[in-house]
Amino acid sequence: MQQISPVNRACGTCTLCCRLPDIDALDKPANEWCRNCIEGQGCRIYEQRPQLCRDFLCLWMTDEALLPAWDPAQSHMMIYRQGPQITVLVDPDFPDMWKREPYAQQLSSWARQPGTTGQYVIVFVGDAVFKVD
């Protein structure tokens, strides 16, 4: 069973949220597969998953303005907002995806957009961290 998004998108075979982020509630380090994930299928403990997992929807699932190229299964990136910050977690198997088009231009555009509190874009690739200007 997959979570229904506000823009009627589905996770499909994407399981990047089970690999890329650090999830303390599951004792899961960043960039390692969650022991409860079946790669390309989803969560083995879906009905009992932690609240953090229940509440999470990546930007692809919530922002209808994102083009199909931003589907995490295609872009190899998981994107989400944290207040004024846009966080981009890049699949370490595809470390340069965020530098390619159409992604690089869109990330720069987001970084340049003025916000009421300022907006910035942070990219995580493995252990490396980049601020997009």
Image (cartoon, rainbow, N blue to C red):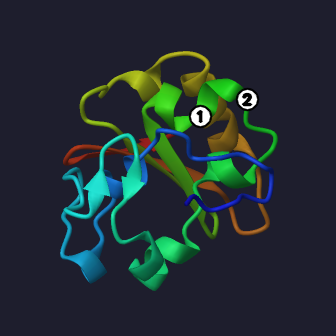
- Quarter of the image for residue 5 reads bottom right
Q: Is residue 133 visible?
A: no
Write down the residue under mark 1: 71
The image quadrant where one finds the N terminus is bottom right
- Quarter of the image for residue 37 reads bottom left
Does the CB distance between marks 1 and 2 fall below 8 Å?
no
Residue 24 % position (x, y): 26, 78
Residue shown at 41% from the left, 24% from the top: 97
Camera-side residue: 79 or 27? 27
Q: Left of 30 or right of it: where is 118?
A: right
Camera-side residue: 15 or 47? 47
Q: Is residue 60 visible?
A: yes
Residue shown at 25% from the left, 29% from the top: 93
Q: Secondary structure at mark 1?
A: loop
Residue 79 % position (x, y): 53, 49
Q: Is residue 108 above or below residue 7?
A: above
The image quadrant where one finds the C terminus is top right
Camera-side residue: 108 or 25? 25
User: Which amino acid type is shown beneath numbered disc 1?
Assistant: Asp
Residue shown at 22% from the left, 44% from the top: 126
Residue shown at 58% from the left, 55% from the top: 58
The tag on residue 67 is 2
Q: CA distance from mark 1 to mark 2?
A: 8 Å
User: Which amino acid type is shown beneath numbered disc 2?
Assistant: Leu
Q: Residues within 10 Å of mark 1 (few under 14, many from 20)?
A: many
